[in-house]
Each structure stands twice: as structure tokens, then as C-alpha cells.
Amino acid sequence: MTHTSDNNSLVYLIGAGPGDPGLITVRGKECMGLADVVVYDYLANDDLLQYARPGAELIYAGKVGGHHNREQWQINELLVEKAREGRVVARLKGGDPFVFGRGGEECEALVAAGIPFEIVPGVTAAIGAAAYAGIPLTHRDFTTSVAFVTGHESPGKEASEIDWEGLSLGSGTVVFYMGMKNLPQITANLMAHGRPPETPVALVRWGTRPEQEVLAGTLSDIADKARRTGFKAPAVTVVGEVVTLREKLRWFDSRPLFGRGILVTRAADQAGEFSAILRRKGARVVECPTIAIAPPESWDELDAAVARLATFDWVVFTSYNAVRFFFARLAAQGKDSRALGPCRICVVGPKTAEALALHGLRPDLIPGDYKGEGVVEALRSVVSGARVLFPKGDRARDVIPAGLAALGAEVTAPVAYRNVTPEVIPAGVIADLEAKRIHCVTFTSSSTVENLAAILGENRLLRLLDGVAIASIGPITSRSCQELGLKVDVEPPAYTLEALTAELVRFFSP
Ligand code: SAH
């Protein structure tokens, strides 16, 4: 009996791509956000789960090597069962769902159950791994065809279903999936059927990920090399003359920080910029916020100022968070931007101006120098006798209130938010440190070091960072490191993220 669903049942079979989380399709990402349930695989990058709705049910259906957590029929049933509950299901599969992914079987089960579905293709491992290894799968000078072949066929199979002759004669590129265990048989078969032993071969493991490893050789020696180096799945085996192009076209695993695990310890909302710079150099960046933003102990001061907003001549914002909390309190009093009336607004720089723009407002003044001193300078000629509201962070320096008061302004400076030390750091970060997957920890202010020590405890900090390079942005931060017993290995001559990155590149160059 087929059961026709009359509710919202729908299953998206989504290709997650080969590993780099940027390689999911736009549609795939969209469908992730529509799902009530996400069923995901071992080979689908966990980072993609962030696209699921908060509260969506996440189910790991992974298969690791031969240890199947669930049999395929159980996965099929799970999809049918969740969909029959009237839920939208995202089935996230590594690479492309229809390339050696048993997506066909999952679809058949859905058809049999009368459940509607959509297939979202993905970048399959062969395509992704070859691209990130710098191997064009076809090239006019070398080959006119490419074949994707399973390497999983049991070696003892008497009548192989693989057309070894077809793959061996001619010059086509051949990519084997799931072929690590059978590599000796695969290469022997190709040579026995006429492929020259000197044909170039590359094994690409964890292609497109920061862990990518490539082993190059020939049909005659690659199996032996793989055995000697302990090269393991998941990997694709690329066979053909195109493999030689890697020497010229290699781009991903030759970046200066490639393969380096680097911990970024900034505040969550400030980490992005530094992480992006490091990633462009090929680093595997792990973010570990050591500063969190929290509301003030009491809203009284800020609320009182907001209640008499129209009595101020100027409002000064020096951070995204100040803007965010100010407008939250305005909303809490049932008001909106109009309550600012004729108040003029000064922001410290373009980032804060962007935060303001979210509320439909443009600043009247942005100083040339994006610092507290710049704000004081910019307001110098207009602020005498003016009433100024400055909603600030609890650790804000006194430069603005003191500077403006000295110019004759009457300054009200309520705390709008606090910088606090988070109680824990993400579990994944500890695991990475324990496993020595982090090669360098970066500190970009004294509070990042001090807070990390406070969260972990000093002994644990020293133990976890043993053998890990320490990079500090400048002498004050370095002193804080030394006070905690950490030896600083990298410190740039200039106090910027770019200079710190350049110094890291130098430190890690062979
Ligand atoms: N549907 C997937 C393939 C699943 S079969 C796709 O389209 O890519 C699993 C095999 O895919 C692995 O044994 C390995 O050969 C290959 N594979 C998956 N991800 C890979 C990666 N990041 N790098 C190299 N090979 C990968």
C-alpha cells in the first residue's frame, strides 16, 4: 500500500559538497533553513548544520568506515517516518546525493511511501578534490574523457562489473571513489589491461578541507607508497596524465598557512575579520571567544537617559554594541528612532555608522581619526554648553567623557553593555587543543590572554598550550602572556592584524 501524504511532508536530498563548507549550493543552504529535521552524514561537514533553523532536530546518520551506525534501510525508514509526521526533512549527504551516495535508494523509498522530494545536487568529491589539488580532470592536451568509478567492488568478485579494459585503454582520466582498501588491486587491474605503469596517479584525502593531503606517484608505485605512508580513506584516486598539471596549478595546499591550526581568541563579534585574513592564507581557523558581551548590571541609568532623550543635543556611539543596546532599550520603552528628534549623532567610525544605518539613521559626524580622541577633536567646536549622551561599554576609556567635559559639555555616560569573560569555551576547541590540532594560539589584547587563563585555569592553560606557538599582537599583550608563564614566539613590529598575519607566515615558512 502506498501512503500519500496530505500534509507538509517533504524531503530535500541535499548535496553538502566535498568538505569546504563554502561549496554547498545556494539552494542547498536555503533548503537547510526550511527543514524541521536534518539527517546528516559523516562526510557532510558539520559546519553546515549552522544553516539549520534553531530548534531543528539534528540526526547523525553517519557511517564511519565499515562501522555502520545505521543500515541503509534504517536511514530510508527514518526519512519516511519523519516526513510522515508532517515535517520537512533535509537529508544532507556528502558530495552529490546521486554519485555513489545511495541517494537513488533513498529516493526510491520516498517514492514507494508517496512522499514528495527535491534533489539538490552538490559538488562531488572527484570534482572538488581535483580542483583543490590543482588537477584539471580534463585538458585538451591530455584527455577527452573522465570516468567516476567505485573502488569498493569486492576484490574477489569473479566477473567484475567494471569495464577494466575500457578504463585502461585510451587516455581518459579515471577517478576512483572508496578505493583505498583495494588500491593494489585497482592499480594492478589497470596495468594488466594495458594502462602503462608510469601513468601518473594522485590520491587526494579530505579534499577541499584544511586537512587535505595529496600523495602522488604512478600506477606502479602508488599502492606501495600509500601503504608505507599509511594513507587512508576518505580519498579519491585520480589516474591520468592530467595529474602532472598539479605541479603547475597547485594553489590550495601551497598557501603559506595551509594545514596550520590557528586559534583566534577575540570577542565573538570581532573575530570575523582576523579569521578571514588567516583563512585567505590557508590556515584552519578555530574561533574561541574569550570576551562576551552582556547587559549592564542594571538598566536604570540608560533607561533614565533614554526617557529624556529629547533633552540631549548630541548622542555619541563608539561601538556596534552601544548602538545595539541603546536601540533595544528605546524599543523596550515603546519608542523608536523618532524619539531622537533633533538630537545630532556622532559615531566613531564606519562600522558603527553601519550599525546605525540598521535603524534608518545617518550620523551627523564621523571623525577623521576613528578613536575616542578623534571624537573629542571632531566635536571641539560645537560642544561647549551642549548636553551629550554617551552610552558606553563598561570598559570604555575615560577619553570621551573627560575630553568633552573639558570642552564645556555636560556629559551623561550610562553603561549600555558589559564585556564579560565567558564561563566556558567551546568543547571542540578543547578537543582540538588536546589532539594538538592547534599549532598556534593568537592573542590580540591582554584581556584575551587573561580571560583564557581565567576560563581554563592557569595550570590547564599551560598544559593545553604546551608545544603550541604563541602569537601576540604587541608588547602589552606579550607581557600579559609572560606573566602567565607563556613564552611568546611571534610578535609583529606593528600593532595590526595584517602585521601579525605576516609574522605568522614568516614563522611557519620552512
Ligand atoms: N556522494 C559522495 C560520495 C560518497 S562515497 C560524493 O559525491 O562525493 C564516499 C567516498 O567519496 C569516499 O570513500 C571517498 O572516496 C570520496 N570522498 C568523499 N569526500 C571526499 C573528500 N573530501 N576528499 C576525497 N574523497 C572524498
Image (cartoon, grey):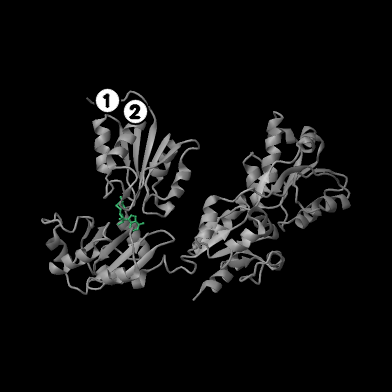
Note whether 373 is above or below 335 in the view shown. Answer: below
The residue drawn where x is 14% and y is 54% is: 161
Task: Give the answer, above or below, for where 411 lies relative to 135.
Answer: above
- Pointer 2 local density, CA inside 10 Å: few below 14, some 14–19, many at least 20: many
| Image quarter for ligand 1 | bottom left
Give the residue number, with chain letter if any, for mark 1. Answer: 3
Q: Residue furthest top?
A: 6
- Does the residue at mark 1 contact the one at mark 2 (Cβ under 8 Å)? yes
**Badge 1: few (under 14), some or many (20 or more) residues near its Cα, within 10 Å?**
few
The secondary structure type at the circle numbered 1 is loop
Q: Is residue 111 left or right of residue 382?
A: left
* Residue 20 locus on image (x, y percent): 42, 55
361 sits to left or right of 464: right
* Relative side of 275 to 19, left or right: right
Task: Give residue 466's position: percent from left, percent from top.
Answer: 58, 66
Task: Please report the residue visible at 81 percent of the width from the left and 39 percent of the height from the top.
Answer: 312
Look at mark 2 in the image and give the residue it sits on: 84
Residue toward you, 405 or 256: 256
Left or right position of 200 against 157: right
| Quadrant hosting residue 373 | bottom right
Q: Give the position of the N terminus as an image quadrant.
A: top left
Foreground pick, 266 / 501: 266
Nearer-the-camera pick, 453 or 196? 453
Depicted 104 relative to depicted 88: above or below: below
Callout 1 amino acid: His
Disc 2 on helix, strand or loop?
A: helix
Q: CA distance from mark 1 to mark 2?
A: 9 Å
Tell me if residue 194 can be seen. no
